[in-house]
Image (tube, rainbow, N blue to C red):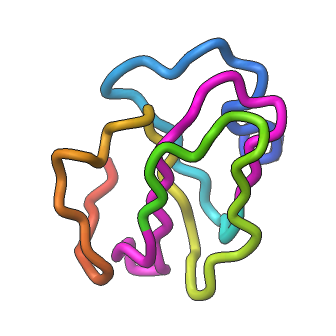
Amino acid sequence: MFGRGVGLMFRKQLAHGAGMWINPCSGIHMMFMNFPIDAVFLDGAERVKKVYRKLPAWYGVVWWEIGAHSVLELPAGSTWGIDLQKGDQVRIG
């Protein structure tokens, strides 16, 4: 619960190639975040529901992504070179 509730808040940065998978999760906020992130919301079968690129620190919010079961929080810009589309399968592990 602590990791899910706190997420990446209060950290100074997120290393390139690193990320956090929050499961279960259908919405996030960027309060107390010191850097922007890319957020990839996934359904229960780990298929892409929605991609948010470069959510700004402190005031970026995704209140509720309908149908999302989890979210990948990645360094800002991580998804730019990837053509992620709704329904794409993601493998975590």
Q: Is residue 34 above or below residue 42?
A: above
The residue positioned farthest toward the bottom in the image shown: 67
Q: Residue at x 43, y 35 (%)?
A: 76
Q: Nearer the viewer, residue 81 or 22?
A: 81
Q: Nearer the viewer, residue 12 or 1?
A: 12
Position of residue 68 in the picture relative to residue 40 (left or right): right
Where is residue 8, by image quadrant? Answer: top right
Residue 42 lies in the magenta stretch: yes
Query: Where does the image place residue 84, in percent across and percent down from the top left?
Result: 24, 65
Q: Residue at x 25, y 74 (%)?
A: 85
Position of residue 23 in the picture relative to residue 42 (left or right): right
Q: Which residues are magenta?
A: 28-50
Position of residue 83 in the picture relative to residue 12 (left or right): left
Query: Where does the image place residue 29, in percent across and percent down from the top left?
Result: 76, 51
How many numbered discs? 0
Q: Residue at x 71, y 75 (%)?
A: 64
Where is residue 10, by image quadrant? Answer: top right
Residue 10 lies in the magenta stretch: no
Query: Where does the image place residue 33, in percent across and percent down from the top left?
Result: 73, 30
The residue positioned farthest toward the top in the image shown: 12
Q: Residue at x 44, y 51 (%)?
A: 53
Q: Is residue 93 above or below residue 31?
A: below
